[in-house]
Amino acid sequence: MPAQLPPLPRLIAHRCGGVLAPENTLAGLHAAAARGFSAVEFDVMLSADGTPVLIHDETLERTTNGIGRVCETPDAVLFSLDAGQGERIPALAEAAALCQQYGFLANVEIKPAAGHEARTAEVVARFVVEHWGFGVPPLISSFSPEALATAKRIAPQLQYGLLYESVPADWLQQRANFGALTLHCAACELSDVVLKEAEAAGVPVLCYTVNDPGEAQALFARGVASVFTDRLDLFA
Ligand code: G3P
Ligand code: MG
């Protein structure tokens, strides 16, 4: 897989299908496709059995009817939970299959539980190399520098994005260290200085989470390449 980005769509469905389905579920991927989205973002964490699954929080309570930490919950329990509207927590393998079926550009956000940064990145990177065999290769990002560095070491041929809330002053140095292709940050934290630096370096900037089409237009006018949105219903 070449470390080259496909053309970035302006709109990326956040946590699979945003508000159209329970977050980080296969129903969200179907909904994103039905709305005509060509790119999706989702969060990946390891179960107690080391299976990469789609979930945002370290704990189960907010998005499922389970309790406790995801990283301490075995697959047999995890996959029996209701993640909303009868949806299950998906395995990364299931999400990848749908991404390939729909031709999505996927932004796989490695979301390690605390203390599991390297192991989570290792599993995700190996999964992508071994099983994401066709279709558009995913763009991998993480708030965890350790996770990003580990994934990059294991799979230097994949595509990486730097992910921050607020972009640090030394981001260009970090970009060089990680060999990252894109810069992801909170829309409300994006400065014109960073935008100028990104433009000069040829780095596409992707902003989350933008739920107002007017705000999205303003960001595009400033030079932002793409926005992550929950409001698929307002954009498509
Ligand atoms: O990857 C962009 C965005 O998803 C980061 O924030 O908390 O929604 O995973 P969060
Ligand atoms: Mg995310």
Image (spheres, grey):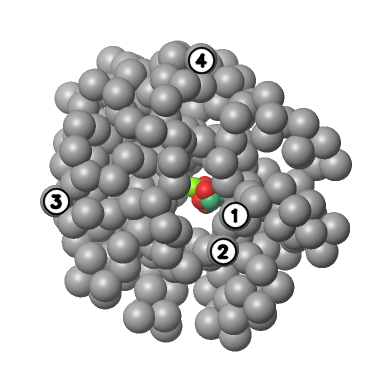
Q: CA distance from mark 3 to mark 1?
A: 26 Å
In the rendered structure, are the residues bearing label 4 and label 2 in contact, judged by CB atoms less than 8 Å apart? no
Location of the C terminus by quadrant is bottom left
Separation of marks 3 and 4 at Cα, in angstroms: 28 Å
**Residue drawn at point x = 32 percent, y = 40 percent:** 137
Quadrant of the frame with the N terminus: top left
In the image, 143: left or right of 171? left
Instruction: Specify which label sits upstream in the sequence, 4 or 2.
Output: 4
* Mark in the foreground, 3 or 1: 1
Q: Amino acid at mark 1?
A: Pro
Residue annotated with mark 4: 153
State the residue position of label 2. 225
* Residue where numbered disc 3 is placed: 101
Residue 6, percent from left and from top? 39, 51
Foreground residue among 85 and 98: 98
Q: CA distance from mark 2 to mark 3?
A: 25 Å
Q: Cβ–Cβ below 8 Å for labels 3 and 4?
A: no
Q: Which residue is mark 1?
A: 204
Residue behind label 3 places its C-beta within 8 angstroms of ligand 2: no
Local crowd at mark 4 within 10 Å, few (<14), some, or many (≥20)?
Answer: some
Which amino acid is tagged 2? Answer: Ala
Mark found first going from the N terminus, 3 or 1: 3
SS at mark 2? loop
